[in-house]
Amino acid sequence: MEMDAAKVKELRLFVERCKRNPAVLADPAISFFRDYLESLDAKLPPAAYKTGASPRARDAKSPMVEEIDEDLDWVDHTLDHESDDEIIESDIELEGDIVEADNDPPQKMGDPSVDITDENREASQEAKGRAMEAISEGRFEEAIEHLTDAILLNPKSAIMYATRASVYIRMKKPNAAIRDATAALEINPDSAKGYKSRGIALAMLGKWEEAAKDLHVASKLDYDEDISSALKRVEPNAHKIEEHRRKYDRLRKEREEMKLERERQHRRAKAQAAYEKGKKKEQSSGRTSGGMPGGMPGGFPGAMPGSVPGNIDMSKILNDPELMAAFSDPEIMAALQDDGWRVLETNPAPFLSSRTISRYRSPHPYPTRPHQESNLTPSVFCLIAALQRADPSAPGQIHWLAPSQLPPSSSLPSRKMSQGTRWMHYLKQLSSANVPAALIEKGQNRVIDASLTLIRERAKLKGELLRSLGGIKASTSLLGVPLGHNSSFLQGPAFAPPRIREAIWCGSTNSTTEEGKELNDPRVLTDVGDVPIQEIRDCGVDDDRLMNIISDSVKLVMEEDPLRPLVLGGDHSISFPVVRAVSEKLGGPLDILHLDAHPDIYDAFEGNKYSHASSFARIMEGGYARRLLQVGIRSITREGREQGKRFGVEQYEMRTFSRDRQILENLKLGEGVKGVYISLDVDCLDPAFAPGVSHIEPGGLSFRDVLNILHNLQADVVAADVVEFNPQRDTVDGMTAMVAAKLVRELTAKISK
C-alpha cells in the first residue's frame, strides 16, 4: 500500500526533530511511538523519559520476562563456576633413595673430529688401565683424571665414556654420569653399558620412568645381574607413576566429557529460556505471529520453495521450542531446501538414511536421544522428533521408522562397520516386532546366568576332585572362548577350540609332554568347557557386556584352587578380558610374554576398541601388565611402534632375532608382580610350521624357537592363552591343529606343578 507523500514528509520532519531534541519523546501523548521503538530494541537517550523514569524495554519488564532473564543469568553463572574446577592430584608413595643433583661444571669431553693415531689408542688404553687400578682401590677422583686423559686421547671410544659414567655413579654425581652415558650412546647407539649407566643415574635423580626405559634397553642388549637388580628397584616406582598418570588422565577426560555434557544441557536450557522469553514478550505486546521467527511472513526461513504440507499442525510446531531451535541450525535448513518438505512428506526414508538414521534401531516412537552410533546431530534429531510429536497420526507426516520399515540396505549409503558391531539377526527380528527392551534384557540375563552357572559348576567339580587328591600347587584347566567376530579379516578362529581339543586327544601321539608330564593325569590337565559366545551374541549382547562375561568366566575357574586357566581362542581380542580377570583376581599387575607376528596394540583398529589388533592397548591402558615383552614381531606399523614406546613395551622383532636369541631363551620374569601370563598367537610361527592362520606372515619363528623360549622361561605362569588358529585355512591333514595342540600341551606342563 502506497503512503500519502505529505504524510511521509511530516513523518520525516518529526524524526529530524526527535534527533535534535530527544525530550520530545517524553511527551505522554506519543508514548505509543516510544513503546514501538523499544519493542524494536532501540536504545533511547535518558532525555526521552520523564525524570525518575527508566527505559521500559529493559528495566520495566513484566514479572514473567524478569523471571526468564534470571534463569538465563543463572545458566551462565552455573556454567562458569562448574567448568573451572581443577583436579588436585594426590602424592605418590615411592620407594628408594634419591641423591641431590650435582651442579658441577661439565666435565671435559673429547673432540670426535680429531684423527686418532695408533699411538693415541695405545696411550688411551694405558690411561684406562691406570683408571681401573684406581677404581679397584677406591680412588675415584684419580680414576676420573685417568679416564679423562683416555677420552681426550681417543674421543671416539664409547666404552671410555661409559666407564667414566660408572665412576661418576659411584661418586653420586648422576648428572655427570648422564652426560657421559649420553656421549657414549651418541658414538654407539647399541652400548649396553651406556644405557645401563644412564638408567642408574636417572634412578638416582628420581626419574623412574626414564630410568626403567633405559634399563630395559640395556637388558635387551646385554643382560646382567646389575641391570636386573636396578630394574627391581626402579620398576615398582615407574609403574606407580604410570598408574597415577593414567588415573588422572582418565579423571580429566571424564571431567572434560562432563563439562561438554553440561555445556550441551546449558545450551539447551538457554535456548528454552530464550524461546519462553520471546514468547511471553510477544504475548505481552499483543502481537500475533505471522510466520517463523527470523523468516519471511507466512513462510519458513530462507523463503523455501513450495509450501508446508497441509497435514502438519502449524500451531503445534510454532509452540514447540525444540523444533524452533532446530530450525535455527544451518544443517537443517540446507536439508530442507529445494523442495525438501515435499521430499519429507512423500518419502522420508532418503532424508533419514542420508543422516544415517537407519542405524538407529530403537522401537520407541520418540526416543530421548540419538543412538550412540548414529551420526544425527542433536538439531536434526530434534527436528524429526518434534515433527513426529506435532501430529503423529496425520497421513503423509514423518513417522519414526521401525527396522522392518526401513528401505533395503542396498539403497542406503554404504558405510563400513567393524566386525565387532554387526547387529545379530535375532535381535533385529525382536526389535522389529516391537518387543519391549526390558523383556529382551531379561531374557539375555537368563542366558548369561545359565552360561556362567555351567562354567562355575564344572570348575567346582574339577576343583573338588583335585583338592581331594591333594599335593597339587597348580593345575591347568582348559577354557574355550570361541570368539571370532573381532577379527579384521577372517572369523575362522571361532571354530578353533574343539579342533584343538580333538588334536590333543587324537591318539596319533602319546599324552606325555616334553618335560615328562602326563596329560591323562587330572592333576596336570582338566577341562571346564567353552563359554557359549555365539549363543550369547545371538541374544543381542554387545561387546562391552561380552568382555565382562569372558572375564567372569575366567574368575570362576580361578576361584577353584588349584585351577589355573589356559584359554583356547578365538581371535586375539579375548586376551584383554582374560588378562584383566587374572590381574583383578590376583590383585595386581602381571608380566606378559606375548608371542605374535603383530604387536596388536592399535588404539582402536578400524574403529573397534575390542579388535583383535587392539587387545594389548586395552591391557596396558588398564594397568594390568607391569612388563610386556612381544616376541616374533615382523608386521608392525608406525602406530604399533609409537604405541609400544607409549606403553614401554619391549618389542623383539624377527629382523634382530639372531642377536636377541640368547636373551629370549633365558628369560626370567615375574619377580615383584603377581605372576606371568603367556599369550601365544599361532601366527608367531613361520607359516611353514603353521599355515592355518588368518594372517600369514612369512619369516617367523620356528616351532623349536618357541619351545626353547617356553622351556627355558624362569617364571610362575599363572595363566595363558593360545589364539588365532583358523581351522578353515588349515591343511587337509590338520597340521596346524596339531601344532596348536602341541603348544597347549607344553604350556600345560609349564603351568602345572
Image: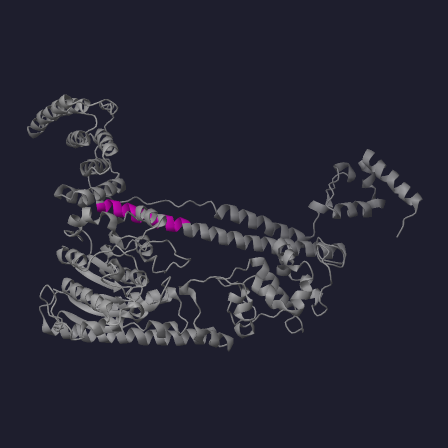
Q: Is residue 168 magenta?
A: no
Q: Is residue 614 left or right of residue 156?
A: right
Q: Is residue 242 magenta?
A: yes
Q: Residue at x 32, y 58 (%)?
A: 615
| In this picture, residue 147 sits left or right of residue 359 | left
Residue 636: x, y in percent? 32, 51
Q: Is residue 133 visible?
A: yes
Location of residue 333 by image quarter? bottom right
Q: Position of residue 70 (x, y in %)?
A: 61, 50
Query: How are the colours assigned in the image?
Result: one colour
Picture quarter with the C terminus: bottom left
Q: Position of residue 181 (x, y in %)?
A: 22, 33
The magenta stretch is 235-252
Q: Is residue 340 above or below residue 59?
A: below
- The image quadrant that residue 688 belongs to is bottom left
Task: Using residue 485 as the reference point, say whether residue 406 is left or right of it.
Answer: right
Q: Residue at x 37, y 66 (%)?
A: 485
By secondary structure, the bulk of the magenta-drawn segment is best described as helix
Residue 627 vs 186, above or below: the answer is below
Q: Nearer the viewer, residue 232 or 68?
A: 232
**Residue at the location (69% across, 45% down)?**
58
- The quarter of the picture where residue 438 lies is bottom left
